[in-house]
Amino acid sequence: MEKYKEKFLFFNAQVDKHLSNYPIICDLEKKTNVPKTYMAGGVVAFVFMLIFFNVWGELLSDIIGWLYPAYASFKAIESPEKTDEMAEFFSDFILYWVPFYFPSKTVFFLWLFLPPFKGAQIIYQKFLGPTLKAYESVIDKNLKNLKDKIEDATKEATKNIIDSTKSEHLE
């Protein structure tokens, strides 16, 4: 049991360190006294429940399992810093339930990286690179706008929660 506790504490510290890079999450933690990792866990659990009960399930699973990783891979490839790392969070858990996932994945990966086939090069040069290059500025602009709107909404919601909590305690 102690081994699992150590692993959990290590993972928790890593997530906390990563979340510390986002000022809005740090502000939210200070204002609510709820640890960042608990908030992140709550969001993950909420998204999982939405997917599980099929409330925006298709959209969320496409974003998590395909759209975001594809765009993040593009950004990492095109980045001048080749130290960018990609993290897989829950894709293995989700994809475990797909029939013949591992055999299909193996064949696909063999096609991608075996020199005679040059699958990765084909996909990037013919489809992914040109398509994303054409829309990169639009995608970046929309992602920034979305991020700004989410931050504004989160700040407003946090302010409303804090204000309502203060007014309840004053009464």
Image (tube, rainbow, N blue to C red):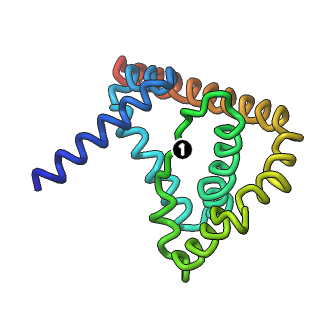
The spot of residue 166 in percent (x, y) is: 40, 20
Residue topped by disc 1: 86
Q: Quadrant of residue 83?
A: top right
Question: Is residue 108 found left or right of 7 in the rendered image?
Answer: right
Q: Quadrant of residue 41?
A: top left
- 44 sits to left or right of 108: left
Q: Residue at x 63, y 50 (%)?
A: 69
State the residue at coordinates (52%, 69%).
95
Please state, as top left, top right, bottom left or bottom right, where the N terminus lies in the image: bottom left
In this view, the residue farthest toward the bottom is: 99
Left or right of 3: which side holds 23?
right
Residue 106 as seen in the image, left or right of residue 1: right
Q: Amino acid at mark 1?
A: Met
Q: Residue furthest top?
A: 170
Query: Would you place residue 90 above or below residue 35 in this image?
Result: below
Which quadrant would the C terminus be assigned to in this image? top left
Picture residue at 30% right of the left edge, 34% below the top: 13
Percent position of residue 161, x then y: 47, 28
